Amino acid sequence: MRWSKLYLPTYKESPSDAEIPSHQLMIRAGVIRKLTAGVYTFLPLGYRVLKKIENIVREEMNRTGSQEILMPILHPAELYEESGRLQNFGPELFKLNDRKNRLFALGPTHEEVVTDLARTEIRSYRQLPQCLYQILTKFRDEIRPRFGVMRAREFIMKDAYSFHESHESLEETYRTMADAYRRILNRCGLENIMVEADAGVIGGDVNHEFIVFAEEGESEIFTCQCGYTANSERAESAGRPLKSPEKILASPMRVETPGQKTIEEVSRFLNTEPSQLVKTLLYRSGEEVVAALIPGDRSLNETKLAKLLQDPWIETLDDESIRKLTGAEAGYSGPVGLPDKTRIIADTLLDDYEGMIVGANENDTHLRGVKMGRDFEPTETASISTVKSGDRCARCGESELVTRRGVELGHIFKLDTKYSKSMNATFLDQQGKEREFIMGCYGFGVSRAVAAAVEANHDDRGILWPLSITPFDAIMLPINVSDTHTMEVAESLYAELTEAGWEVLFDDRDLRAGFRFKDADLVGIPIRITLGERNLKTNKIEIYHRRDDRSELVDREDVIGVLADVYGSLR
Ligand code: ATP
Ligand code: MG
């Protein structure tokens, strides 16, 4: 491909709305262009990468025995009423009406559609197990579309769905899929880890995410030497020893804390550690008021709370409602003396507490020496706070949890009978009895993978495409495009390489060499073949290895051999 003919516009400056390196570089290097918030075009360079990732995904899916299909994007909304997700997806679901005013949704994922397919087609256990997949555009009206194609409103996903008669059969496919995901990411050249995760609106109990390591990735994960891995939404810890535990008093002691509302203010005022305080956060879940109690030095994990309450739409109580409920301003709420019907959920870490300092439900007042179980009774205990790096692992109880950041590329779920039950999708088992399908589903963000690849592979000059998904194998850069001899060698080498099946980007643009060198670094092709007048006098050509920042001079005849060496088994 000749750059002079290729639609590959590059920018020196980053767009102002691009917050992370991958987004900045993908715009600057002509990989993607924005149409509107969360909606992007893949330009030729980006589309080539997308197709390569898609091919790897397809090969690995086919290897598992999963079969490719193509389901519709336009979904009748009744299916979502059946599954209950018209409610649960809420505003993230794109909805539209047809000319007869019938409601439709643009597919955010395809559990409903594929379950409908199975319930009409699969009659007998003899037809099981089945696994179907597709690679298709999805639509989700994300609250905060950002980071380019990383969190888009229209994006490409590979989604697979499996149907089983037994849990053993599901387990087998689940493992096969986990292996396939690892292979896909390794083949894409992306360092990754599988972690326990939260199921969100998809549902089911067991689920895992595949995270590609990247310093500015949206996901935070925790790992332990013992092998425990989980994302921040799911992770649980055994906390850490308290610096100076609050002592239990014979009865709670009222202390005046005028104007001191935040944890920092109160702990400074009382000259205590923030961990001696317990935060009482008030939420509304449907008709119910929930008091969530967590250590003062931690944050509430809303995902955990929502899951516990089985309500994705929990919201914090407004100041007025807090005043009505507790009789005091927000900031002085506490668990002692709340109305009986309040559901009190205590974080598991509070089990280790002797006494605690809490709000007194009275303005400018706190209580010291409070004991859980004596001064108030929690309705239940559950892990609802966030984990911190350095906490003891909840699984082994010994080692410390370590945190890392990354980008979520894959998410696999054991759905069990969540959809087959609500949508009445059944088959006849060996005894001729009607049973609900046991299901799994397996998503992979194909367009997000392009962004993750850049996020995990770049330097201050530009992108460093992994070899297996690079848009071109090499970029050829004649330094002086007006020199006849240089261009003769360039043309013949270009023809030879292309003939041999190498994908070469020939930078034949009549622009300053310095400018084109910068562009070559920016677009990040792994190998640059530089043709200079002086070197050519001795039949030499410079090969620059972009990732290692290393150059070598080779004879013109050996260029093809270097490419073969670098790409090795990938070809
Ligand atoms: P997230 O927690 O990032 O919102 P999710 O749990 O909603 O992800 P799934 O429903 O499991 O994601 O979708 C499967 C995969 O699709 C994700 O692992 C991710 O790679 C990709 N994906 C999800 N939402 C988006 C999006 N808005 N833009 C691009 N890719 C996405
Ligand atoms: Mg999401």
Image: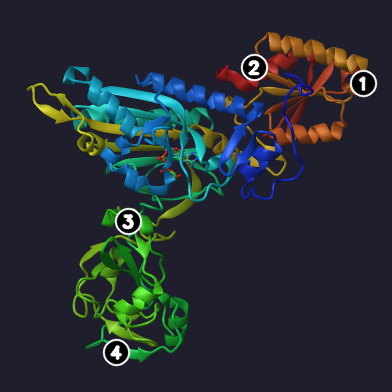
Mark 1 residue element: loop
3D distance between C-alphas at marks 2 and 3:
53 Å
Left or right for 437, reference 244 = left
Mark 4 residue element: strand
Check disc 4: other Cα within 10 Å, few if <14, some if 14-19, many if 20+.
Answer: some
Q: Amino acid at mark 1?
A: Ser
| Quarter of the figure with the N terminus | top right
Q: Are marks 3 and 4 in contact (CB under 8 Å)?
A: no
The x and y percentages for residue 75 are 38, 32
3D distance between C-alphas at marks 1 and 2:
30 Å
Specify the label residue 306 is tagged with: 3
The x and y percentages for residue 412 are 36, 36
Specify the label residue 253 is tagged with: 4
Label 3 CB, ligand 1: below 8 Å? Answer: no
Residue placed under numbered mark 1 in the picture: 482
Q: Nearer the viewer, mark 1 or mark 2?
A: 1
Q: Are marks 1 and 3 in contact (CB under 8 Å)?
A: no
Q: Residue furthest front?
A: 100
3D distance between C-alphas at marks 4 and 2:
77 Å
Residue 423 quadrant: top left
Q: Nearer the viewer, mark 3 or mark 4?
A: 3
Q: Are marks 1 and 2 in contact (CB under 8 Å)?
A: no
Residue placed under numbered mark 2 in the picture: 564
340 to 464, vertically: above or below: below
Mark toward the start of the polypeptide (4 vs 2): 4
378 to 143, vertically: above or below: below
The x and y percentages for residue 274 are 42, 76
3D distance between C-alphas at marks 1 and 3:
66 Å
In percent of the image, x 41 and y 70: which residue is there?
297
